[in-house]
Image: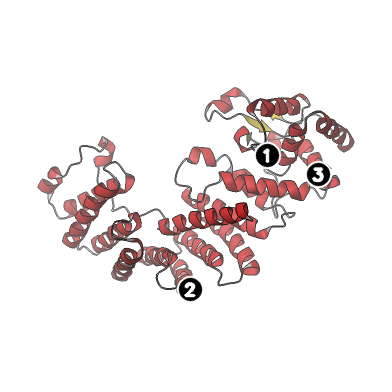
Amino acid sequence: MSNYILPRGAERSSADRRTYTAPDITIAKAWAVFDQIREDDLLAADYLGFMACIGGANVPESLLPLMASKEQQTKALRTLTRREVITERSHKVQESSGDRRFDMPLPVHMASVRWLERHNQLKAWVKAAVVRLEALVPYVGNDKKEIWTQYLPHAIYVVGLYVIVDEAASAGLLDRIGRCQASLEQYLAAEMTHRQALSIRTKVLGPEHPQTLTSMNHVAAALNGQGEHSTAEAIHRLTLERRRKVLGLEHPNILASMNNLVAALSGQGEYATAEAIHSRTLELSKSVLGKKHSNTLMSMNNVANALSDQGKYAAAEAIHRQTLELRMEVLGERHPDTLMSMNNLGYTLSRQGNYALLEELNFQTLEPSEKEYIEPLESPKSLESTEELLQVQEKQVEDDRCCCS
């Protein structure tokens, strides 16, 4: 088993070793079982191939490819459990998510990989695993974390398999993993993930390709999340320079780079410079996206926060009022961005001692816990909402091309 496939540089943890308990099994005996499964239930054999290419522990049923009806899927899983190829976790474990979960014992997992190699199917199933996980792991990990976090360990596993031949697909999945890690505030892990994607894209696409620059942007954002603001600033400036050269001055990704550069500057206390860049970003956003676009309103919010950081509370208050009015019109009273503006306006009023005006604000829609004013809130951690939208749109265009080709 010395050439059993593991992610590059990875070893199974002690927790994994505890999870993988199974009766003693030989490769020959396991292969005989696998061959019998392939004769009896093709869907079960397909699931066996798929599960061999992801982490064998704690596999959610919802991760399995949608290849047949629910009844056929249930039958296939029953075939695998009856043959002791997989074991189902206790119902108590499943109650929290409502998703059935399965383990593939380590000896079986090892034997199944060798079986796929013998039948020249390993690369095909690794590719299928990458495609499936790309469909389940989101570009933006801010929502439904209880769902996608169960897929994340399997995504991390599959991108490390050395048999992956489509490096572009690997980089795309690495993108998703890194962004999700950042949303969990796992910034060091996110940095390492994005550096892998950057290395692949630099080699395959070149140093100035838009996707390569996206990976540079993500690396810098992850560094900023770790407090390495100076290093992040340098990378953001280089990314911005290259994006201007490649994409032009009014591309939406320019806005993302400018916002991220400001985040790095703010982390170093350079609030005046941050304000100046935020103001330029706002004017560009109005020109490119329109005055009422959600990202333009986020830029207005950021300008006001930069003013607050410098103690210019009256000027910040005026902009926060405009932003709140527009967000209530465009997004509604209960939208998170609207609540953010309420919070930030309340903060500037409290810093000026305008408690009477605070009482006049219409905060009755807020929950009691939301009425406490905290530090001004900005956009999500890396201030990349514009770029997130663009990436999703680009992915849809790529999918359309594939369907039409």
Circle nearer the N terminus (2, 1): 1
Quickly name the residue at label 2.
238
**Image point (18%, 42%), residue name:** 362
Give residue 401's position: percent from left, percent from top: 59, 56
Q: Amino acid at mark 3?
A: Leu
Q: Amino acid at mark 1?
A: Asp
Q: Which mark is residue 116?
A: 3
Please name whichever residue, 281 or 309, is drawn nearer the observer in this view of the structure.
Answer: 281
Quickly name the residue at label 1.
16
**Image point (21%, 62%), residue name:** 311
Circle nearer the N terminus (2, 3): 3
Note whether 150 is above or below 172 in the view shown: above
Q: Which mark is residue 270?
A: none
- Residue at disc 3, secondary structure: helix
Dividing the image into 4 quarters, which one contains the C terminus? bottom right
Give residue 164's position: percent from left, percent from top: 71, 54
Real-space Cα separation, disc 2 to disc 3, in angstroms: 44 Å
Dividing the image into 4 quarters, which one contains the N terminus? top right
Q: Residues within 10 Å of mark 2 (few under 14, many from 20)?
A: some
